[in-house]
Image (spheres, grey):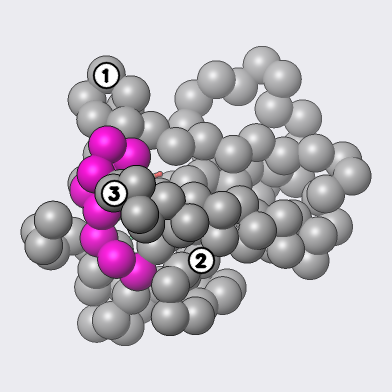
């Protein structure tokens, strides 16, 4: 649960990133290798490694991640055109960074893009 990842360093501002939002529970920054015109990562500040590791009593963090996704989509004016939210889990899910995060992708039509 306490493994240091690149995201922990971003949260602590130890390495540079394009931060778009931050509060005590969640940070949002631009993905360094965007898979769509808009590609943000919505990341809890608490380093749950995967979806599997969110305790039932802390599941409210997921609601908060969705509320921030709504807010970011509205601010970026893609709420009506549409967007995709993705959470990868472990190896078969394609998760590379073991710190829970939600991808927000949009700004273009993603119908034929299954990759995050
Ligand atoms: P996942 O495959 O779901 O674990 O996604 C991890 C994402 O983190 C990938 O889309 C990477 O491009 C992104 N990523 C890795 N390092 C950084 C970084 N330093 N700043 C922003 N995004 C990053």
How many residues crowd around disc 3 within 10 Å: few (fewer than 14), some, or many (20 or more)?
few
User: x and y percent of residue 115 in the render?
Assistant: 49, 25
Residue position marked by numbered label 3 in the rendering = 55
Residue 107 placement (x, y as % from top left): 75, 45
Magenta includes 12? no
* Contact (Cβ within 8 Å) of mark 1 with mark 3: no
Give above or below for 7 relative to 66: below
Farthest right residue? 80
The reply, left or right, for residue 76 in relation to residue 91 is: right
Near-viewer residue (78 or 60): 60
Q: Give the mark, 1 or 2, whose residue is nearer the N terminus.
A: 2
Write the start and end of the magenta stretch as one range: 45-53
- Residue drawn at (11%, 62%), measured in percent from left and top? 2
Residue drawn at point x = 89 percent, y = 44 percent: 80
> Which residue was labeled with disc 1?
92
Which residue is located at x 26 percent, y 53 percent?
A: 48
Whole-percent x, y for residue 86 in the image: 52, 36
């Amino acid at each position: 649960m306490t493994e240091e990842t690149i995201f922990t360093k971003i949260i602590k501002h130890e390495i540079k990133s394009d931060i778009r939002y931050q509060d005590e529970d969640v940070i949002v920054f631009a993905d360094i290798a965007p898979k769509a015109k808009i590609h943000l990562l919505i990341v809890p500040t608490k380093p749950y490694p995967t979806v599997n590791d969110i305790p039932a009593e802390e599941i409210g963090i997921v609601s908060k991640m969705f509320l921030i996704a709504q807010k970011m989509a509205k601010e970026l004016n893609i709420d009506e055109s549409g967007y995709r939210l993705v959470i990868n889990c472990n190896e078969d899910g394609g998760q590379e960074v073991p710190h829970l995060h939600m991808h927000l992708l949009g700004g273009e039509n993603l119908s034929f893009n299954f990759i995050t």
